[in-house]
Image (cartoon, rainbow, N blue to C red):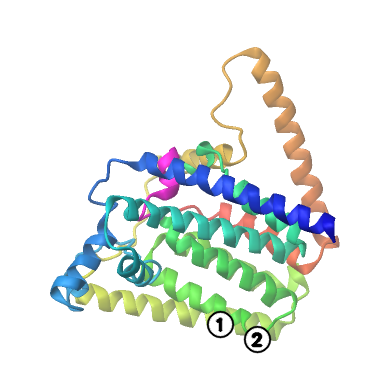
Amino acid sequence: MIKRWVIWGLFALLSVAVLISSLGTAFQTLPLNPDMAEMALIYQGVIHHGWRFPFTWRFTQDNQILSLLPFTLIYYALASVSGASIIIQGWLIFVVNALLAGLLVKTVTHSWRWAALSWLLSLLASPMAIGQPGILAYPVTHNSVWAFGLLGIIGLIRYLSDRPNWALPLILMCVAVGTISDPWFEAAFTVPVLLIAWKAPRWFQTDKTTRRTLVKSLIITYIAGRITYFGLELLHMVPGQGLGIASFPEMFQHIKLLAQGVGVLVQLYPLPKNNYIWSIWVIYFISLCSIIIFSWLSIKNGSSSDRVGRVYNAAEQLCPE
């Protein structure tokens, strides 16, 4: 009992330390710019002009109307609008994502210890992996809609493994919010989930009825989300979303950016500049490849939640923004 209390006390102490550290990093976003204050400005508009004001605002395509706006209206009603509260808004989004990352790890590993470690490591994420130091707390980014992506992955893993009643509604809610709030969500979440759902009977020994229900529900929800977005277009709240095909030079550039992004994520990019670091880089690269190969070979022997998590990660990498 004493050992457990000591461990939890140490975890609480470390949590406070990393929260303070990440909050200090968040304030590197100062000075503020107009984009960072968007939600605060909308809140001020609602206060002074009423609830019709959001319908007069011209949002961008990644509008965050459902993924962020409702929460920020409540937040600013409680905290009021100031330079500090705008920064803290972005920091809270980062903290929520770190918490959801821990819950995702708990869903896959069934271990609160690994979840706690994930929580701490997420809050201490390298700036190379998450962008410039201040971007973690930028108040209006994909981070807000990706909180629903993390929730959706948790729901997907549970739905394909033990199918609790809440899992499918959670997935569909996340797809609806993401489709309306940010076109980036389609490539980062909806397409990979559809791919996994389509291949579920083969990859996860899921019965075809479960697969059919998931695929149909996802398509219907996505279509409903797109219709809703079109309605916002008619109200002149958001710009249109065109469908185009990139030229071959653009495709190669996108592939290059994808490779660089994945390299940064796994600490392989930027490339080293001296021979000593190159030798370490090669050893690390070989080790990483070995881990990936052995992990892939173990997918068939792992639990359903393990397989869903690994395959989703691979599918998401194949569907860049």
Question: Residue 58, how many percent across, how many down?
Answer: 20, 64
Q: In the picture shown, does residue 250 fall above or below 182? A: above
The span shown in magenta is 132-141
Tell me the kind of residue under disc 2. Asn
Residue 152 in sight here: yes
- Please say if the residues under marks 2 and 1 sit with CB atoms less than 8 Å apart: yes
Tell me: 274 left or right of 145.
right
Question: Residue 173, how many percent across, how many down?
Answer: 49, 78
Judge by depth and name the residue closer to the eye, 166 or 70: 70
Question: Residue 2, how many percent across, how many down?
Answer: 83, 57
Helix or strand or loop: what does disc 2 sit on?
Answer: loop
Density class for disc 2 (Cα within 10 Å; few <14, some 14-19, many ≥20) is few
Inspect the magenta stretch and tell me whether residue 255 lies in it: no
Judge by depth and name the residue closer to the eye, 54 or 256: 54
| Quarter assignment of residue 211 | bottom right
Residue located beneath label 2 in the image: 165
Density class for disc 1 (Cα within 10 Å; few <14, some 14-19, many ≥20) is some
Q: CA distance from mark 2 to mark 1?
A: 8 Å
Question: Residue 177, how many percent across, how many down?
Answer: 43, 73
Helix or strand or loop: what does disc 1 sit on?
Answer: helix
Q: In the picture shown, does residue 267 fall above or below 315? A: above
Name the quadrant of the N terminus. bottom right
| Quarter assignment of residue 134 | top left
Q: Residue furthest front?
A: 2
Q: Residue furthest left?
A: 49
Tell me: 231 left or right of 152.
left
Residue located beneath label 1 in the image: 169
Judge by depth and name the residue closer to the eye, 46 or 132: 46
